[in-house]
Image (cartoon, helix red, strand yellow):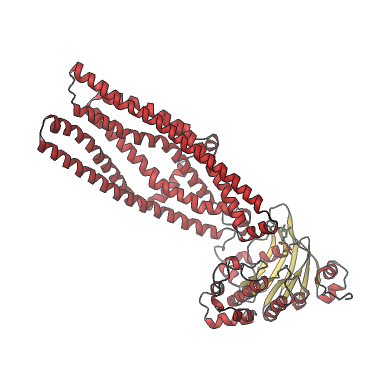
Amino acid sequence: MMGSGGGMRAGRGFMTEEEKANAPKVTGALLKRVFSYLNPYRGQMTLVFVCIIVSALLSTMPSILTGRMIDEGLIAGSLPTLVKLILLSLAVTLGANLIGVGQSYLNTWIAQHISYDMRCQMFRHLQKMSQRFFTSTNQGEIITRMTGDIAGVESVITNTFSSILSNISTLIVAVAAMYQKNWILATIGILVVPLFALPTRRAGRTRWTLTREAQACNDEINGILNETMSVSGQTLVKLFTREDYEYGRYQEASQKMIRLNIRERLAGRWFMVAVSTFASIGPLLLYLVGGILMMRYNASLTVGDITVLVTLLGRMYGPVNQLLNLQVDWMRSMAMFSRIFEYFDMPVEIETPEHPVTPREYTGAVRFEDVDFSYDGSRQILDDISFELKPGRSIAIVGPSGSGKSTLVNLIPRLYDATGGKVLFDGEDVRNLDLTFLRDSIGVVTQDTYLFNGTIRDNLLYAKPDATEEELLNACERANVMDFLQKQEKGLDTVVGNRGLKLSGGEKQRLSIARVLLKDPSLLIFDEATSALDSISESKIQQAINPLIKTRTSILIAHRLSTILEADEILVLKDGKIAERGTHEQLVRSGGVYTELYETQFKPKGLDRI
Ligand code: ATP
C-alpha cells in the first residue's frame, strides 16, 4: 500500500532509481508479519507510546513558560513569579528528560529482544538448510543477513518506529500551542516550513547517493581484505608475489573512499548553510508580522507570545526534517525485513519425516537401488547406481577425479537426497529415518579435514562432549595420534590454529579419525586425502584405519593401493556410473578402467609388471 500510494510521495526525492526499483512491495501481509515480531512486547510498546506522548507534552511546556516569564515576570516586574516560573520550567524539563531515559531504555530493550528472537530463528533455520544452500550461497551474504540486516531491524525498532510517533506528537503539540497563541502567526510559521524542508530534501538525496557509493566502496575494500588476509589468500599472494598488485588494488579503493567521504561531508556543509539561512527566515518573519500586529493593529499579542511562537517554530524544524527522512528509512527497513523473511521462507530441503521409522538392526548396512543424482537438475552426476554393503563389510570406491565418488557417499548421511532411486541405511530408506539417528550412526573422515580453532581436546570433544580423558587418549592411540601428542608440550591442550593449519595434512586426518572413533558410528566413510602424504604419514594413517575397516561396515573412497587392498569389494566409478566391480585381482586383469587407474595411480613405484 505504501509502495505506490501516498506514503511513497513524501520520500521520493531521497530514493535512488535503483532503490525505487528494489523497494519491496509493502503489503498488508508483510506488515502483519513485521508486527507479529512486535506482538510479544505489546505491553512494553504501549508504555513507550505513553512515554513519548507525555514527553512531547512536557518538553513543549518550557517554551510556553518562557512567554509567561517574559510577560508576567520580566515585563510585569515580578521577581517571585519569575523565580516560580523558572523553577517550574526546570522541573518540567527534568521530568521530560527522565521520561526520555525510561523511554530509551524500554526502546532498546524491546529492539534487543526482537532482534534476538529473529537472530535465533535465523540461526536455527540456517542450521536446517541443506548442503546445496551452503555451496551455492555466498558466505558473505549469509553473514550480512545474520548481522547487518538484523542489526538494521534493531535500529528500525529503536529509531524509526518511535521516531514517527515522537515527531508526530511533538508536531501536533507545537502546532496546537501555536494556534492557541495566535492563528495568524501560527499559519505564517507553518507556511515557512517548506522553505527549509526543500533544501533538506535535495541535500539528503545527494548524501544518500554518496553514502551508497561509499558503502559499495567499503564492500570492495572488505572484499580485498578478506581475500588477501585469510590464511590461504595470504599464501597465494606470497607464492605468486602479488603483494604490489594487491597493495595497488587496496590503495586505489581506499583513495576512492577518501574522495567519496570528502564529497559526502561537504554536501553536508552546503546543506547546513542552506538550512540555517532558511531556518532563520521563519523567526524573522514572525518577529516582523508579530511586531506589525502589535504596533499597528493593537492585536492582543504580547512580547512573550511572540517569543513563544518563535521558540515553538524552532521546535518544529527537527521533527519535520526527520519525518521527511523517515520515508526512506521506512522503505529501507521494509527491504531489510523482506530480505530476512526471504531467508525464513526458504524451504528446508532435508528434514526428518513426520513419522520416522526405527531400523530393526543397527549394523551400518547400506544399499543403493538404481540411484540417480543431479545437483542442478540437468547434469546427471550419478547414473543408475546399485550396490549393497553388508554389515561389517567394506567397499572401496575408486574412479577418476570428478567421477562422482564424494557425491555418492554424501547421499548416505543425506547431505543431498537422491533424485532417483533409493538409498537404504540399516535396511530403511534414508528419507524415512530420523535425521539425527542417521547422522549419528555415520562417521565421516573427509578429505579436507575441518578442525576449528581451539585445542586438540576441544576438537575431539565435538564428537562426544562427555568423553573421559581415558576415552580421548584411547581414541588418539587407535588413530595413531599418540606419538604426535607426546611431542607436544601441552598434549591434548595444544592449540591447532586457524582451521587446524598448524598441523600437517597427515596429522589433521589422523585427528579426524580419532574424532570419528569417539563417535563410534556403525558406518564409517573414509574419504582418503588425494594430496600426497609422505610414506611415513601415509602408513600411520593406514595403521589407524585398517583395524577400523576390519571391525565395522565401511566405505572407502580410495586413492592408494594399500587402502584399496583392505576392502572386500571395489566399485569403479566412471562418469557417474559403476563401470566395473570386483576384487583387486579380478579387476586388475580385466584391462578396463581399473587397470588404467592402477597403472597411472595406484601401482607402487618400481613395479613394472603386475
Ligand atoms: P575427486 O576424486 O576429485 O574428489 P569425485 O569423484 O569425488 O572427485 P565429486 O566431488 O563427487 O567427484 O564430483 C562429481 C561431479 O559433480 C564433478 O563434476 C563436480 O564438478 C560436480 N559437483 C560436485 N559438487 C557439486 C556441487 N555442490 N554443485 C554442483 N556440482 C558439483
Q: What residue is at 39 percent from the left and 50 percent from the top?
A: 38
- Across and down, in percent, residue 316 comes to 32, 33
State the residue in front, 124 or 278. 278
Measured along the vertical axis of the image, is residue 82 above or below residue 182? below
Residue at (28, 45) in percent of width and height: 50
Q: Quadrant of ligand 1?
A: bottom right
Furthest toward the top, the residue is 296
User: Is 64 above or below relative to 46?
Assistant: above
Residue 133 visible, this angle: no
Which sits in the foreground, 163 or 390?
163
Q: Is residue 205 above or below residue 561?
A: above
Q: Nearer the viewer, residue 542 or 246?
A: 246
- Quarter of the picture containing the C terminus is bottom right
Residue 307 can be seen in this image: yes
Residue at left offset 61%, top offset 54%: 227
Q: Is residue 154 left or right of residue 288?
A: right
- Residue 275 % position (x, y): 39, 30
| Percent x, y of residue 322 | 38, 37
User: Residue 29: x percent and y percent?
Assistant: 46, 44
Furthest residue to the front?
A: 244
